[in-house]
Amino acid sequence: MLKKRDDFEDILEERRNSSDLRYALRCYTPVLYKGMTPCKADTLKSMVLQSNQLRYVISQVSKETGRATDDVREDASAILEEMAHSLQLSTVRFFAFTLSKVFKTLFRSICVNEEGIQRLQQAIQEHPVVLLPSHRSYMDFLLMSYILYTYDLALPVIAAGMDFMGMKFVGEMLRMSGAFFIRRSFGGDKLYWSVFSEYVKTMLKNGLAPVEFFLEGTRSRTAKSLTPKLGLLNIVMDPFFKGEVYDVSVVPVSISYERILEEALYAREMLGVPKPKESTSGLFKARKVLSEDYGSIHVYFGQPVSVRSLAQGRVNRCKFNLVPRHIPGKPSEEIQNFVNDTAYRLVRAQEENMVLKPWVLLASLLLQHHHQNQTAGQERGIALDELTAQAVWLRDVSREYGAFLNWPGVMTPSEVVSSSLSLHRGLVRICEGRVQLAVEQTATGEPHSAVTPEEELLSRAVVVLSCASYRNQALHVFIRPALLASAIHAASSNQKQEVFNSFSFLRNMFSNEFILCPGATVQDFEEACYLLVKTRALQVTQQEVLVTERGQRTLAFLTSMLDPFLQGYQVICRFLCEEAADTLTEKRFIPAVRKFIVKHLLAGRLRYTEVLSSDLQKNALAALLRLGAVRKIKGAEPGTLKVNAVMVNSLEDTLGKNRAVSWTRNTQQE
Amino acid sequence: MEVLKLKDYKWNAVTAECKAQESQKTAGCSGEAKTVPRKRHEIMKWNGWGYSDSRFLFNKKGQAEFTGKRYRLSGMIMPGLKDWFEVTFGASLQHKTPATPVLTSSSVPPPTLNEAFVEELKSTSIPFSLDAEDRVFRAHGHCLHEIFALREGKFGRVPDMVVWPNCHNDVVNIVELACKHNVCLMPYGGGTSVSSALECPPEETRCIVSLDTSQMNRILWIDEKNLTAHVESGIVGQDLERLLNESGYCTGHEPDSMEFSSLGGWVATRASGMKKNIYGNIEDLVVHIKMVTPQGVIEKSCQGPRMSTGPDIHHFIMGSEGTLGVVTEVTMKIRPMPEYQKYGSVVFPNFEQGVACLREVAKQRCAPASIRLMDNEQFKFGLMYSQMKNENVASLLSFLMKNKCTSLITSFKGFDPNNLCVATLLFEGDREKVLQHEKQVYDIAAKFGGLAAGEDNGQRGYMLTFVIAYLRDLGMDYYVIGESFETSVPWDRVLDICRNVKARIVAECKDKGVQFSPFSTCRVTQTYDAGACVYFYFAFNYRGLSDPVNVYEQVEHAARDEILANGGSLSHHHGVGKLRKEWMRDTVSNVGMGMLKSVKDYVDPKNIFGNGNLL
């Protein structure tokens, strides 16, 4: 399981020692795909407007709507105008200068794996390249371009959401640094889709610039990877399917922040305090942010993946022989499945190369302690040396599971722990040698206005959710063993088949919550078994799955990790059974379920404030819709939800069996 | 021969004339000059391409020369070839891989004979042979693996005997006997197959008889009113043209293999000729076909130029690749010989522009008799052949510049020697019309940045066509193996297929451990209304590989997969044979296979024509 990974180099180090201005003005001569010189933004636009595909769709739309083709072409041109990037080296240089200043203030280091950069450089010359960074912060795409500029690599064009365009000046700046803007939803708009896809394909096919976009579609507020969106991935693979390029290299990039700039912002957003609309003034208010220490960033450029080799034996490209290639068509099921599988594979590649800081482990441990003490009515926290010992244990376990852990070797464990805690002092409180989450105070710097119990609950939840977002960074390491641990707990016997069934149920239930590749139940089960057997937590025979003495602790930890999610899904099921009226719509679901949960939390009937996360609630609803326990019907209002009470009830019961109570007791005894 | 102790059967010295046919000969068509003797190996290589007297070699000075007297290139020295060869392939004259010089009869498996068949055949006085040389010569086409094995002196299953029918009736007799005695017949025409069509199926346990049509090579009559000629199927292309030329006619059917390939072979494989733009492909040229099958003779009752009488039975015959019977006589269209011929060439700044020009020419339906577009690699190769010493791209450009008006010179600025490509042209017809046509084509070319580059460059291009197969033998003397293969593809796919297939070849070679970068190039050789024919050339230096042929075959297989994935056809004119059989079902659908199968089952239920091609 131990993967060989590249070493990192801190690109800020040089910035601290030499002139930023000279750096911003230096000679920039990137290598390009087949020596292609990038074309002007205007040339690109006219290539798109004159493409066969767009001309075809324009005439289609004109026939359908009865409007003159020239009018439709005007529309297309306007869409393109709104969308297109206008990359300028001068703007890039401006960013290179200012970002150097900003980054040096905010971050201790920006570490990049240079071998990955070399691989990327090679890939850019051979085939059109698609960059797929993980998305945790607004910072991501500026950071990406900054790094590529630093290494003298071709600057990417980046698909960005239209919401940025709200910020007039910033939007244009981003456009000039290579961003192009797409509307968040344009479902039925044929013309829009066509302009958009042709724009991306034209850049890609001609190798004008690497295309960058976020597979997850949006920033993950929870630090968990999001279920990948397939639209853009489909578009960038299309030129390969149709033989317009020999291959496309897809490069997953994992960006991990030691401290996320938007930390508390995200938590509030998930608790229902709406996120501040992106506005230029809002960004300046964020200046406060500049005065804090955000630790380091690790950026790992993964192995370029050849779409051609992935598609080998899976996609029959001959299917495209019988229809002119410029006529847009719905991708076949074969293609859809392939794109979907590839998307998951790429997100997993992002996850695997995500650098984990010791704090991630500490956050996991602190959260578990928080919840246990809460039940026991004590809020004294955990002794620092005890925390250190547990962290060392967890460090070793996670390494065995293949985590990409950045645990400083030169420091003693207690130094590692205290430096981590100090960086995240907004989230923890250390008192008399004991550590606990900083839940009593309101979050840093906020005035003491919270008076109602509900407000107090929410302010506590902000800390818990912030903390959970760090734990979530490690979830991908533990998720498969954790599902297995819960499955073992739930299964009525040690029979392997029964454990597998239980595992399969959980995996199915949570496949909107975690990145679990579709159709890979058996592999995931085997992987989980392998890891637990390897760490001697489990004995797996032909027929049986047995927990070892030594495995109790591991399994207790793993089940506790999953427990908040189990309780979350359970309580949502209960909500749907008890409170869902006929008028419940998708839109009203979140506020209603939130109210229900707050009520139960205040009554002390729920253990995890985490379940207040709207992310979890949305995922649970998506899962129930997928499983058919809830259906969307054409009611009085769009998105009316119809609950199948019997099914939801039974799901709730089954989830209940998996709950970790007995395991946590075991841990307490140790 | 000595080993076989089968002297009783040595009837090959006996010549039996087919009297009935003899009397039908028209005065204008003398059948005397026989290009192809029964003992082919007396004038042709048994383990390489073409005539024994013609071959490339590096002389003592290390300069390449072409021996013999038959070709324009014969006796010439090509100083540039050595460098080109060494640079392109990383080959060296020090590293030789000579072929086994003589055929050792003892290593040829002895024939499995059907005694009863042989006895009855004897009574028909049709000549036949059991000689190892004769049998080996007819056991192969010109696929790389076939020639490679011969050079190593290795023989697989070879035909057990060779028969030389002299006329249609002889064939009828042979087929009847074969059916009676359950003997496997494999028709053999010119032996230029590149689809493993002539390989004997190793699992065949019956006696395999190779039916060599080479002695059926007469023009039986010429009909000047209707402009048709009735010809025996064994005639090879060069004889057919020469004999018709004597009467002032031509068929205009000129496949690259026309020196050796036969009329019957063209029909059996759906051949295509270089000048199809004027004369058409074989299916356009054929008016009437006579074929002998196990069920009897198939032919139409009249020679109407077009019929609506159900599916055209000619299309069961054309492309049947010897699986249904033997084509014995064909009536085909002839044309008066053209008054005027003119070669030409156009240099384009890049391949993309060249393809765009060809597409436009096709669109305007003004293609010359032949128009071919070479990619940059082949352009460079062509230059190397130029007789001018030390000539290179730069000097060609300066040559062009000197010969052009100054206004054109500026346009040379956009020309990068590593992107340049060249189209070769051949115009035919009335002098007046040719010149007019020529102007039209050059005007179109100019729109795509093409510059006329002289007649010589064009003519040289066509001349090279006939010696390129000889060149492969030279490569094989020095660790270099290669081959060409073709496809047809819609216009919008041409550039994509060229790029992707060439890239696939390079990638596969790397993947299979080929130590030197391969020569992977292409040309567009035919234009149609809806698409083009594309040829790929692929060769590499195999030093360091233990099983080069296997590597070669894997790469070619991958290249074919790539062709199909890019909208190309399984074959434009080489046929399927056994080499491309595995893709037939996907190509023609299950029902299509069923149709072909049911025709085979009806026509040849005992699989007498058991060469195993196509299905």
Image (tube, coloured by chain):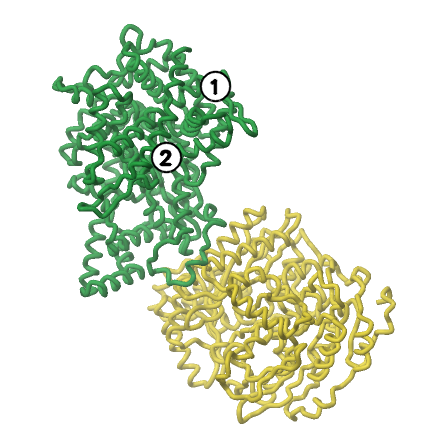
> Where does the image place residue B220, in percent across and percent down from the top left?
64, 88
* Circle 1: element type: helix
Give the chain letter at badge 2: A
Q: What distance separates the C-alpha of mark 2 from that of mark 1?
A: 25 Å
> Where does the image place residue B282, in percent across and percent down from the top left?
54, 77
Nearest to N terminus: mark 2 or mark 1? 2
The front one of B597 and A502 is: A502
Q: How many marks?
A: 2
* Circle 2: element type: helix
The front one of B151 and B7 is: B7
User: Crowding near pointer 2: few (<14 within 10 Å), some, many (20+)?
Assistant: many
Please give the residue where the numbered disc 2 appears in the rendered image: A509
Residue name at image x 42 percent, y 51 percent: A334
Rendered shade, chain B:
yellow
Q: Is residue B499 above or below residue B262?
A: above
Report if residue B67 is visible in the image.
no
Please give the residue where the numbered disc 1 appears in the rendered image: A551
**Are discs 2 and 1 less than 8 Å apart at CB?**
no
> Where does the image place residue B62, in percent across and percent down from the top left?
65, 58
Rendered shade, chain A:
green
Report if residue B587 is visible in the image.
yes
Residue name at image x 16 percent, y 33 percent: A276
Q: Is residue A537 above or below residue B77?
A: above
* Left or right: residue A639 compared with residue A247: left
> Where does the image place residue A103, in percent across and percent down from the top left?
27, 28
Give the chain letter at badge 1: A
Circle 2: residue type = Met
* Left or right: residue B564 compared with residue A452: right
